[in-house]
């Protein structure tokens, strides 16, 4: 992590007051950790939760009067966070800003202290949401949510024995787990309203067990740690690391290491090369998102001057040495070729990985460097076979139905070709062929 921007620590009240009594052992360890990090140049905002104190007050009120309004429940929780925050502020009084943030409309100016403490604000908003506001207002890109759970699971592990831990996911998929509405006392890893804002402003949130201080240290120092990372999906070189191609987190896992996967890739690449050669008959071709260049290899053997563009350094490093001169590193949103460079441009299972806002630029670039045709094979919602085999691939951020894509091509002015091209059944694949207009 970068010390240039502050880190938001969302300190769960369950760590401070786990069972109604204050956990002084944890606070002593936390005190030591924060002071060591501050001494080495780190800056923190600590958003403090209410924990068991809040629940005790809520239960007591309900036991006496039978029913408490949601607003009063929220206020009991808010005041509990402020009590806990004052304790944390007292512990760090020599290095923390003198004011505890309780009103998020009043931004602190000229902060010279390395530490700022914050608490709950007003009904309807959780401390998760408040922490997200801190990140937005003070230039932080990461929130570390220090809770009493080690990771997020795909379902409640207390109820389902087959619940699986999630190491990394996107906001789009995380929202499916937590829903879209908030109620006081809601027990979720990160609340739905905060989720919406975090997704909007592009935050990353790390959820981990907060009383595991060595694990927290690993996060800050960039070492392997145990926890769940929720992130905005960004199609950049850093995403396509070895883990994606070999580690089992996406559709390309085992791409160059698992015998069955390698065989399947070669067969599908040969099939694609044959269909393209027979029905589009290009003299030159660019395969965008070519990975290790398998289709480029087969097309070149068929007499096509084929080249490939790939964003991943790792994938390019795994290409056959004789093939590397025909492959180039590049981004679909900025292809490294002039206009009308190739008879045909192809993308296979690429566009579903592109955020919706970037799709027009990606499509424009493919269209720009083509002379005759652009072929896009896209994972659409009708392809239930792909959904079955790759449902855990969180990089699928733009999965729509066929009609959605037809409308997008029409809107952007890219005419679809009526040329005959054989396609597999829709439950397996969706292929679009765009014809390059002479005026484009």
Image: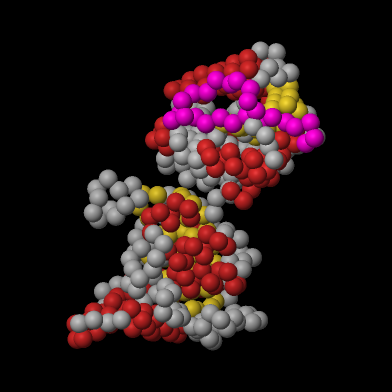
Left or right: where does residue 69 sit relative to residue 318? left
Image location (x, y in percent) of residue 340 = 78, 31
Please tell me whether residue 423 is drawn above or below residue 42 in the rendered image: above
Of residue 92 and residue 233, the one placed in the foreground of this image is 233
Left or right: where does residue 310 sit relative to residue 371? left
437 part of magenta stretch: yes
Image point (40%, 49%), residue name: 166
Q: Residue furthest top?
A: 302
Residue 67: tell me if it is visible. Answer: yes
- Magenta segment, prevailing SS (helix, strand or loop): loop
Give the total number of marks visible in the rendering.
0
Please tell me whether residue 197 is drawn above or below residue 353 in the rendered image: below
Of residue 113 and residue 314, the one placed in the foreground of this image is 314
Question: Which picture quadrant has residue 339?
Answer: top right
Question: Which picture quadrant has residue 64?
Answer: bottom left
Image location (x, y in percent) of residue 359 = 63, 45
- Stretch of the chain drawn in magenta: 417-440
Image point (59%, 81%), residue name: 107
Question: Which picture quadrant has residue 364?
Answer: top right
368 part of magenta stretch: no
The colouring scheme, among rainbow, by chain, secondary structure or one colour, is secondary structure
Image point (61%, 68%), residue name: 139
Looking at the rendered image, the quarter that the C terminus falls into is top right
Image location (x, y in percent) of residue 270 = 56, 18
Please tell me whether residue 281 is drawn above or below residue 226 in the rendered image: above
Image point (56%, 30%), residue name: 431
Left or right: where does residue 378 sit relative to residue 361? left
Looking at the rendered image, the quarter that the N terminus falls into is bottom right
Residue 209: tell me if it is visible. Answer: no
């Amino acid at each position: 992590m970068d010390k240039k921007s502050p880190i938001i620590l969302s300190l769960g009240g369950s760590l401070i007051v786990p069972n109604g009594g204050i956990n002084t052992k944890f606070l002593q360890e936390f005190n030591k950790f924060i002071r060591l990090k501050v001494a080495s140049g780190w800056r923190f905002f600590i958003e403090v939760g209410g924990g068991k104190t809040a629940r005790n007050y809520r239960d007591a009120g309900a036991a006496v009067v039978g029913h408490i309004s949601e607003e009063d429940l929220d206020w009991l929780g808010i005041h509990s966070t402020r009590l806990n925050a004052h304790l944390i502020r007292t512990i760090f009084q020599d290095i923390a800003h003198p004011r505890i943030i309780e009103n998020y409309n009043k931004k602190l100016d000229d902060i010279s202290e390395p530490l700022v403490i914050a608490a709950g604000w007003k009904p309807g908003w959780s401390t998760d949401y408040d922490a997200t506001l801190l990140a937005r207002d003070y230039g932080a890109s990461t929130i570390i949510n220090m809770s009493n759970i080690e990771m997020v699971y795909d379902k409640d592990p207390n109820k389902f024995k087959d619940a699986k831990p999630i190491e990394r996911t996107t906001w789009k998929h995380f929202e499916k787990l937590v829903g879209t509405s908030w109620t006081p006392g809601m027990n979720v890893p990160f609340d739905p309203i905060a989720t919406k804002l975090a997704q909007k402003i592009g935050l990353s949130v790390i959820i981990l067990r907060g009383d595991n201080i060595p694990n927290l240290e690993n996060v800050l120092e960039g070492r392997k740690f145990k926890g769940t990372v929720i992130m905005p999906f960004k199609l950049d070189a850093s995403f396509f690391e070895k883990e994606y191609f070999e580690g089992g987190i996406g559709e390309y896992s085992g791409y160059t290491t698992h015998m069955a996967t390698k065989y399947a890739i070669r067969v599908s690449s040969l099939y694609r090369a044959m269909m393209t050669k027979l029905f589009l008959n290009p003299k030159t071709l660019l395969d965008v998102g070519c990975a290790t260049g398998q289709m480029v290899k087969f097309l070149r053997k068929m007499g096509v001057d084929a080249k490939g563009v790939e964003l991943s350094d790792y994938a390019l490093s795994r290409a056959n040495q004789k093939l590397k001169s025909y492959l180039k590193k590049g981004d679909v949103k900025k292809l490294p070729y002039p206009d009308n460079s190739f008879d045909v441009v192809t993308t296979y299972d690429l566009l579903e990985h592109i955020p919706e806002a970037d799709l027009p630029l990606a499509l424009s670039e493919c269209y720009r460097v083509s002379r005759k045709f652009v072929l896009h094979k896209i994972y659409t919602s009708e392809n239930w076979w792909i959904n079955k085999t790759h449902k855990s691939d969180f990089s699928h951020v733009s999965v729509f139905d066929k009609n959605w894509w037809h409308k997008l091509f029409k809107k952007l002015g890219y005419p679809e070709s009526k040329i005959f091209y054989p396609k597999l059944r829709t439950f397996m694949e969706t292929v679009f062929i765009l014809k390059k207009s002479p005026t484009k």
